[in-house]
Image: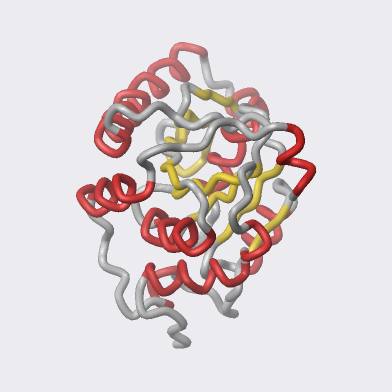
Amino acid sequence: MDIRYRDRHEAGCVLAGLLEGYAHRSDVLVLGLPRGGIPVAYEVAVALGLPLDCFVVRKLGLPGHEELAMGAIASGGVRVLNSEVIESCGVPQHVIESVAAWEGRELERRERLYRGHRTPPDISGRTVILIDDGLATGSTVRAAVAALKAQGPARIVVAVPVASGSTCEIVAGEIDELVCPFCPDPFLAVGLHYEDFTQTTDEEVQTLLDQRTAVVPVKPSAADGMAG
């Protein structure tokens, strides 16, 4: 098995080298998916001089088939629904509301834990670099992308250290840019390509965010956006 990364921090350094074109731009924001995406995103944000925040997303799984997403809720009070799944499966509204309420409580818990008193960043009109530690099925990242689109970003970039090639193709069709240096074939699992894939703890997420998110820059001006 081809192991590419010592740990998530090294993987983030590799991604940073591929994202140098976004360095020190006032219109760019790095968002990590908790928990494993935060150490990766932290290294990118530090190397490129960009602000970092977490983007908490919870899939609204179809009861009994939770991997099938009928929608998602995310940081900033965003809720998106997959009408195709809802209609084809005949999901009644009360089921959607019940699942959304359950997942909403977990999202709020994680928001309080990770962000504290910091308000969610303003995504409208900005370039967002969304980072995770890898893509297997891609369901979480796709849910996050759908939620981000509802907030009107100028551009969405998904960056991951390792991914399934077939998943990359699907995700790439839904965003503006995909950055992934390693798509092994066959792809078995994200963790197989890290020497250390120890589960990231809530405490580590909090520490990294506290170190990097003292202040999130205000929404850039039109001139800043043109300068990039």
Residue drawn at x 58%, y 50% is 129
Q: Position of residue 119 (x, y in %)?
A: 40, 26
Q: Position of residue 224 (x, y in %)?
A: 71, 40
Q: Nearer the viewer, residue 198 or 211?
A: 211
Residue lying at the far left in this picture: please name it.
203
Nearer to me, 68 or 143: 143
Residue occupying image coordinates x 37% and y 49%: 212
Colour pattern of the rendering: secondary structure
- 60 displayed left or right of 83: left
Q: Which residue is rendered at x = 60% and y = 74% of the image?
A: 181
Location of residue 141 in the rendering, given as x and y in whole percent from the top left corner: 54, 48
Q: Nearer the viewer, residue 110 or 120?
A: 120
Q: Answer left or right for 133 relative to 109.
A: right
Tell me: residue 99, above or below residue 157: above
**Position of the N terminus by quadrant:** bottom left
The number of numbered badges drawn on the structure is: 0
In the displayed orientation, state which residue is furthest to the bottom: 1
Give left or right: position of 159 versus 209: right
Is 164 situated above or below 95?
below
89 in relation to 52, above or below:
above
Residue found 58% across the figure and 28% down from its top: 89
Residue 67: x percent and y percent? 46, 44
Residue at the extreme right of the image, as rendered: 226
